[in-house]
């Protein structure tokens, strides 16, 4: 009986810790007035848009406890961005709207 040591197709495209930093800083909201205004005046719509752009359920951020943290971790993983779930939790807890703007700018930079 053979032992499988490598799962076929289970390769990470980037290292687990990421290889780069966010394209825009957390407080760079003024560099993108569109995402700033959409987040400020329509946060629920902006959250649904971010979920849709990452191919998640649009209700995830409002129906799943910690959904915004999970969404931020997903965007980091998709983009190969350095960070941790603990840092994601701290950023979302302390600067939620700024993190939403940052995620939107990052998805724009990634072409999503």
Image (cartoon, rainbow, N blue to C red):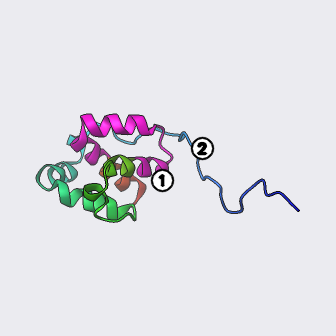
Q: In which quarter of the image is residue 28?
A: top left
Task: Classify mark 2: helix, strand or loop.
Answer: loop
Whether residue 8 sits left or right of residue 71 in the image: it is right
Of 4 and 32, the residue lying toward us: 4
The residue that appears at 27% across and 62% down in the rendered structure is: 49
Circle 2 residue:
15
Q: Position of residue 70 (x, y in %)?
A: 39, 50
Q: Give yes or no for contact between labels 1 and 2 (Cβ–Cβ under 8 Å).
A: no
Q: Report if residue 106 lies within the magenta region.
A: no
Whether residue 83 sits left or right of residue 63 in the image: it is right
Instruction: Point out the image quarter for the C terminus.
Output: bottom left
Q: Quadrant of residue 7?
A: bottom right
Circle 1 residue:
78
Residue 27 visible in the shown view: no
Q: Position of residue 110 (x, y in %)?
A: 42, 55
The residue that appears at 30% across and 65% down in the rendered structure is: 58
Q: Report if residue 88 lies within the magenta region.
A: yes
Instruction: Point out the image quarter for the N terminus.
Output: bottom right
Q: Main secondary structure of the magenta part?
A: helix
Pointer 1 or 2: first along the chain: 2
Examine the rendered structure and indicate whether residue 55 appears above or below residue 28: below
3D distance between C-alphas at marks 1 and 2: 11 Å
The residue that appears at 26% across and 61% down in the rendered structure is: 48
Q: What stretch is highlighted in magenta?
A: 73-102
Q: Position of residue 51 (x, y in %)?
A: 33, 60
């Amino acid at each position: 009986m053979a032992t499988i040591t490598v799962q076929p197709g289970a390769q990470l495209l980037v290292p687990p810790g990421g290889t780069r930093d966010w394209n825009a800083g957390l407080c760079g909201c003024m560099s993108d007035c569109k995402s700033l205004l959409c987040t400020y005046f329509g946060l629920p719509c902006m959250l649904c848009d971010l979920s849709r752009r990452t191919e998640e359920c649009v209700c995830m951020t409002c129906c799943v406890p910690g959904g915004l943290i999970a969404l931020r971790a997903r965007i980091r993983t998709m983009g190969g961005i350095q960070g941790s779930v603990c840092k994601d939790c701290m950023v979302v807890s302390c600067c939620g709207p700024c993190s939403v703007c940052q995620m939107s700018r990052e998805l724009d930079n990634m072409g999503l």
